[in-house]
Amino acid sequence: MNPILARKGETVLLMGNEAIARGALESGICMAAAYPGTPSTEIVETLSDVAKDLKIWVEWSVNEKVAFETAYAAAISGVKSLTAMKHVGLNVAADILMSSAYAGVKAGFVIISADDPGHHSSQNEQDNRWYGFISHIPVVEPSSPKEAYHYTKESFKLSEKYGHPVILRTTTRISHTRQPVILEEDIPASPVCKGVFEKAIDRWVLVPGHAKKLKIKLLEVWKRIQYDTGEPFAKIINPGMKDVIIASGIAYSHVEEAVRILGLESKVTVLKINMPVPVPRKPVEEVLRNAERVLIVEELDPVVEKQVKSISTELGLDCKIYGKEYIPENDELSLQIVYNGLCKFFDKCNPGLWESIGDLKLEPAIPPRPPVLCPGCPHRSSYYIVKTALNRAGIRNVIFTGDIGCYTLGFQKPFETQMTSFEMGGAIGVAHGLSKVVDETIVAVVGDSTFYHAGIPGVINLVFNKGKAIPLILDNSITAMTGHQPHPGTGVTATGEPTARIMPEDILKAVGFDPIVINPLRVKESISTLGKALEEFKNGKNIAIVSRARCALEVLRDARRTKTVLPVYKVNPEKCTGCLACINLSACPALVVDPDSRKPVIMEDLCAGCGLCASICPFKAISPANTPSQDWERLW
Amino acid sequence: MKSRFNLILVGVGGQGLITLGRLIGEACIRAGLNVTVAEVHGMSQRGGSVVVHVRIGEGDSPVIPVGGAHHIIAMEILEAGRSVRYANKDTVMVVNDLILPPPLAKYPGKKDVVDALKSKLGKVYLYDAEGVCKRIMGTPISSNIALLGFSIGVNPALESLISKDAVEKAIEALFKEKAVELNKKVFEEAFREGRKSIGG
């Protein structure tokens, strides 16, 4: 059985994101909508796995803004709901976020923001706790995966109590850490799923006259939250000391262990904060009144620090408050970093703790291993095809604007087909702007899911405002990087129901492009098709390219399930001259150089059988070594 | 204060490190222990270096300090070399006898890395995990489980926390049908070979 459905009293190993999903189910949600994004994805993915059994609505929406609107609509009609997104996703949904605070909700509504301190999988490490201030929405943050379960439930309670949205902020190290969780409740058998939309024009229609009045109410709620909340959003440990540590979210877990290691448990007061915005006023005042020295420990920005300093000033206290002097403002925190900060603050360290033996000194050194396109990844072939076709058409110095997805890895050699990457859908808008100020040919590279997410307004604008760029849609028919979630081009919903399949080429055609669809597995054929299209482009036509083949990871999985034998390629050492064009032009991880012969060898366990290397080889030295199933190509 | 047991798992994205982390986590539940298993997902998984932090015992902070690992399981030799920053002189290290060079890179030879590891650490074990899997299952797919079996075999401190019995129960919970028996066999055999290599 799915551990997410386990009974009350059981102990289950849950990833922070699964713990959030379980907490939401226990709270009685009947709606969840999200757009996938690391580190948030598994929250709604977990819910989608059980949605049919539990008869709740779960969807992958086209982007975070639409996801927010979908879930919010349920909450204003009395149905508990959540929306989840990565930190930068909340930027996309920020407009409705602000409005939701004004209008409030009629049932519990939790917005989960999964932040990424340390840039594990993101373009920035923005601290979304700030959104609490600009929107006037309280931000709850757990200190561990098991607390993620607990505080999801508390967030729903808080939202219901004030009729107000609540942001639950998690981070990569909570979302993607597994921990035993003891389940406190069963999932209700019949949550409220039928809503009632009550017309309340002065509440749901935010024209200035209505919003002005709602703002006054909003500020009252905001104040009540600051003064009413204590437990469970703040906890004072060992009260009454002159040295005080205030720690928020996961920083508390680091502090707890560092204090134990330093043997300071009985010497300092620790204030554990699980609502950093707004900080619960009373417990902060209580610890400040006794304090002489205060250290604020929090990840990223001084969000709690600024509030505590302001409270101290208001109260006219003369305790000294420190924070970012001891704890870095960038990157994720860890036990080690917090321990070092505490060592300095208390002038007390444990000698001989964690003595690393240091790095190995080797010649050549251990090479870095950055993430790369997988063996068989169709993006690799697409990049090769497009670059070769452009080159043959005599189009040089091409600018490739880029976007967010696995294909962003194309910034690396030998492809260099991502020269910008800022935000979702950005490739097309940036290409349009560049086309107004530079003379080079511009190719705007965007993935299928990203195209639906925020690329469509860009292509409309490009045509409307007479820009000149070639959209290249890398269509692997799935949201691949986040772990294969369906999207409008997949033909199934989040719960596996068949639905309309909306093709990128149809959209491109409707807005005024001549789209060319190529199959990146057929390298020579695609280069020649593109060659013809590029001639038309030179003559002034708006062309767009859709390169379509499924994600290799999905193909390999389906091949295993259906016992389909894919081709496995081999290098014939007789014909191979060791020119290494195959490796230098594809950078496929399945190709390695044999240290003795200096010739390439294909690792058969890794080869996915795309055949790109065979197409590249000028000496026809690479060919399939096995007999593939007759219909293998249909899996792509 | 009883400190936590720190176990680092390293390898290359796609080698089964996340499954291994989950298996250890499930084994800890069966042994009645708190555990945190910190993973990486998304882009960082695509064929890149992967580090999973497993911390057993009371506490919630998930990332192991540099120099703080009690035991390291490396599924690949270059990643073993990269992971030594987590080791101190007492760290036990079990290394899969497998090298996966990154494309387009110059890299040191297997023997050079292993010799360098042995010069810095007292307890380094090179283990042919693919060998045991291929003998029992015909594929290298359970190398991760073999390395765990071997690790518990060579490190009594690890065994005192997660017993063979706890891991076998976790295998029963995580795998289905035929895979349960095969994985148990791989685990058992690797454990035996580990025990033998410390003269047990």
Image (cartoon, coloured by chain):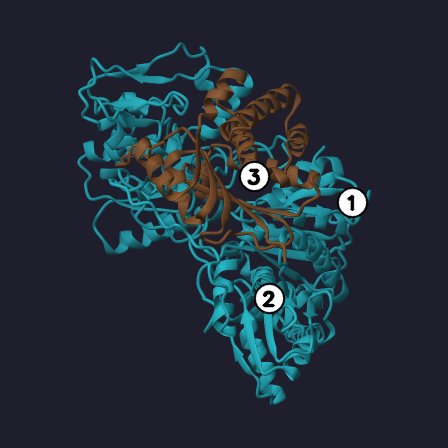
Which label was assigned to residue A263?
A: 2
Placement of A35 over or under A197, stated as above or below:
above
Chain ID of residue with mark 1: A
Q: Nearer the viewer, mark 2 or mark 3?
A: 2
| Gap in angstroms between the C-alphas marked 3 and 1 | 27 Å
Q: Chain of mark 3?
A: B
Q: Residue furthest right?
A: A189
Q: Do discs 3 and 1 belong to a common subunit?
A: no
Q: Nearer the viewer, mark 1 or mark 2?
A: 2
Question: What colour has chain A?
Answer: cyan
Question: Which residue is pictured at 78% across the width and 45% down the height?
Answer: A187
Q: Colour of chain B?
A: brown
Which numbered disc flags the more N-terminal residue, 1 or 2? 1
Residue positioned 29% across, 24% down in the render:
A613
Instruction: Give whichever of A294, A461 is nearer the camera.
Output: A294
| Kind of element beneath mark 2 | loop
For residue A88, above or below residue B91 = below
Are the residues flagged by discs 2 and 3 from a single subunit? Answer: no
What's the residue type where badge 1 is placed?
Answer: Ile
Which of the 4 image quarters holds residue A312? Answer: bottom right
- Point out residue A495 in the picture as x, y percentages from the top left corner: 64, 35
Residue A514: x and y, percent? 35, 36
Q: Measured from the top left, where is residue B81 in percent x and y?
A: 37, 41
Which residue lies under the disc numbered 1?
A187
Q: Is residue A77 above or below residue A21?
A: below
